[in-house]
Amino acid sequence: MRKYLILTMLLFSLSLLTAGDYIIGTGTSNQNYVPFNGSYNYGWSRFFFTADELLAAGMTGTVEISKIGFQLVVNTLDNYITNNQRIYIREFYDENYPSSPQYINPSSLTAAFQGTISWTSPGWVFIQLTNPYTYTYNGGSPVANGIEILWENRDGSAQSPYPRFTYTSTDNYSAAYKYNNSSFPTNSGTRTKNRPNVWFISPATTVPNPAVNPIPANEATGVEITTNLKWSSGGGDPDDYLVSLYTIDPLTYLMNNQITTSTTYTLPSLLEYSTTYYWRVIPRNSFGNAIACPTWSFTTMADPSIMSYPWTENFDGSEFPPTDDWLLRGGDLVDPIQLVGSSLWEQDDWLNISGTDKAARINIWGIVNGWLITPQFLFNEDSDYLYFDLAFLKYNQPPTGTPPALTGIDDRFAVLISDGYSWSTANIMREWNNSGSPYVLNDISPWGERICIPLNDLTGHKRIAFFAGSTTTNADNDFMINNLYVGPLIIDPPHVQITQIGDNLCLLSWNECSGATGYDIYTANSPEGSWELIASTTETQFELSAQESKKFFRVKAIAR
């Protein structure tokens, strides 16, 4: 699986490099075709570095190149996987590619690397060569020897967005490329002066340098509680890193010297809001730990949750979704749930009747699905219930028009509640379907009905999601929700009737009240009198003995 994260570019300072680090190229512009073009399934590239460039970078005498690094920038990714990548390195004596650079068959060369590369950004991504390349400067006789890198992308799959690499424009044509979707290309390619910046690394001879370019940046504020920790190598060929994250007052470690070989660390849990965190990365290699590693800090954002209840939303505003805190997503209601992109939920007239009363609507007619996700709530003692109006109608028809089609046996409508960062079918609070649910989808009224879902047992930060979807093209219907409410119980007042059922018996009866778990029955000698509790029941009727004197009765719906 490929996951993507859009990030801004951070530049790397070269002032800390050791003798085993050789960077060529300082440009900050970016391109996506050398060393490979991730928007195509297959491709090759060639790019060279002259002897003068290698000497200027510090490659004197004999140097063993054990790693190669490329710098990723804006519109780059987190753990973007490319399989079957092949890298070859050879001596090169020219200073310019011809107008139709040819593909070089590497059959006579030993692959410096063949395998899978994970591209994580921003900053430098390093590739450990399985067969290190040894470069020895020949002194310029008879012709100065440079280095050429041959790259083959034989992955066979492409996905957008894709890696973009910093490059430096050279005076001559120093790079060439060819890409194709149907098969690996072996024909001539296109030349360019835009050569990727490259970091060559030789085996370490001392401890590595401290890490640089922390993300979150040092002393950053307003940081998302979902953030991961990222940094760049400071040079010196580190083998791994020790990562610590903690708070003070009191000192509490979330991680203490956790070991990772990546320059990204995924935190095991969400952070707290409005909290200052301190963190440190210590690079290590066989010579020991980096010295004088800095401690960085950042402060997370204030809690944006809805905390005041009751909260309501009627979708009557001019914007949909009503605020930026709402989310529109797509994705099947099947574990593992993966939400992507947007959805078909939109604002429309409630019950398909033109007017100012608006609602959220989704049209389900084929293999479609959609999620409408509320802003984040902080549930407390005042957020015990969710209410909303739900209607099921024929597409674009009012309740008095063509009734909804009943052939959507695969259709589903569900309400889910989770922390909002991950979702599963275990988060379903209530589901309407036509395949065994106690809440039958085809029975939803086209005139709308009031839904009440208890939230009593839920605490903490939550989001509410409304899902509608279908896996087959059949019925063409609209699902609508309106008049959302989160807050204390709204109890419908019981409408009480009294009926004589015998010489000495009377029956009190009343309607079932939404959200009520029981009913208390009171009596008094007058409407203004003192009311006495005489019974409690979960039923909607109660028998009592006839009285010689006039009595008044009251039924109170309760939620225990």
Image: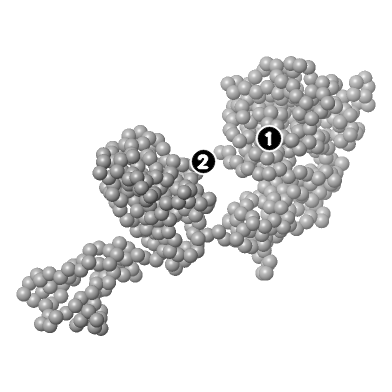
Q: Amino acid at mark 2?
A: Gly
Give the Cα separation between the discs numbered 1 and 2.
Answer: 22 Å
x%, y% of residue 267?
Answer: 62, 53
x%, y% of residue 505?
Answer: 10, 74
x%, y% of residue 178?
Answer: 68, 22
Quarter occupied by residue 58: top right
In the picture, measured across the screen, residue 473 lies left or right of residue 547, that is: right
Q: What SS does tag 1 mark?
A: loop
Q: Earlier in the sequence, mark 1 or mark 2?
A: 1
What is the quadrant of the N terminus in the image? top right
Which residue is at the front of the view, 538 or 481? 481
In the picture, measured across the screen, residue 545 lies left or right of residue 211, that is: left
x%, y% of residue 410?
Answer: 34, 40
Res 341 label? 2
**329 is higher (above) or lower (below) than 487:** above
In the picture, measured across the screen, residue 483 lies left or right of residue 54, that is: left
Number of numbered discs overlaid on the protein picture: 2
Which residue is at the front of the view, 391 or 37? 391
Q: What SS does tag 2 mark?
A: loop
Q: Amino acid at mark 1?
A: Arg
Picture residue at 78% right of the left edge, 44% below the top: 12
Is there any visible trace of residue 544 in the rendered image?
A: yes
Is there any visible trace of residue 198 in the rendered image?
A: no
What is the quadrant of the C terminus in the image? bottom left
Picture residue at 74% right of the left edge, 35% below the top: 29
Picture residue at 72% right of the left edge, 48% below the top: 231
**403 is higher (above) or lower (below) than 313:** above
Disc 1 designates what residue? 164
**501 is higher (above) or lower (below) than 166:** below
